[in-house]
Image: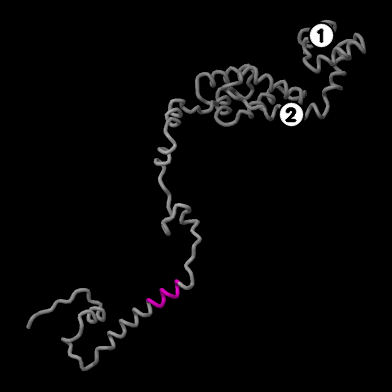
Amino acid sequence: MLQEDFNIPDEIIVGKLHCLFTRTANKWYYKMRIDQGKHDWSWWKSEVITKWANNSWRSKMENAFVSSIFNSEKDKPLTWFFKQKDRVSALHPDMSNTMINIKILRKFGGELEHAIKCRCVELCSTENYINAMEDIITRTRIGKTWIKNPIESKMVSNIPREDRRLEKPVLKCHKCGSTSHLANTFTKKTKINEVQVIEEVQCTEEKKESDQYCAISEDTPVEDYPIENITAFFGVTEVHTHLA
């Protein structure tokens, strides 16, 4: 890029390599410089591609791009955006600048992506995207996580644990009244013996009522009929007696 944009000679570009490389790459450069001697920029470019542009490096770079998520509380828009752009450019050298910006913009997602798209046109430059991004984050709450009020959390933490338990309603099973489970998980079934006892009690009550009806013969005068039998037989709830 330096040679194409500024027409800088190879000697100056090669002399700046020790400043561009860091950590492992810098050690590799010094070792190659001692072993191979002085070479032009085209030779160093082919050696860098052979050394680093392999499948392992591409996989590492792609994982770094996918896992990098913008956090408005920690990351600066300018630094984060250009770092992602360098990663995409290294993975896809032939991709246009517009497609790179769109690929990075999709990583925001949700409200922040929508707000940036509304501010910028489709064929927008990288600088315009970054300016819109900084303006949205600075002036709005879009893209920011909700932070709990520390005063409210402190007040809740000062409440004793016993008082917290008293505030919560006690849940009970409306079938048996137990607090160990709820009605939807109630598994206790009625035993067969209990069902038989209930049926026997119902049969005895029905038998008593039928005996009372049978105890009244045809010769019994109407005035001697019990009031209970009359009301039960005719389904009358109230009986009014009139004196002759």
Q: Is residue 182 above or below residue 18?
A: below
Q: Residue furthest left?
A: 244
**Amino acid type for the residue under numbered disc 2:** Glu
Residue at image point 20% right, 85% down: 225
User: How far from the left and from the top, in percent, is residue 238?
Assistant: 19, 74
Split into 4 quadrants, where in the image is the C terminus? bottom left
Dividing the picture into quarters, in which one does residue 176 lie?
A: bottom left
Q: Which mark is residue 13?
A: 1
Distance from label 1 to label 2 (Cα)? Answer: 28 Å
Dividing the picture into quarters, in which one does residue 103 lie?
A: top right
Q: Secondary structure at mark 1?
A: helix
Q: In this image, 139 relative to 213: left or right?
A: right
Residue at image point 72% right, 30% down: 63
What range is drawn magenta here?
Answer: 194-201
Residue picked out by circle 2: 62
Q: Indicate yes or no whether the magenta region holds residue 187.
A: no
Residue at image point 64% right, 22% down: 123
Nearer to us of marks 1 and 2 is 2
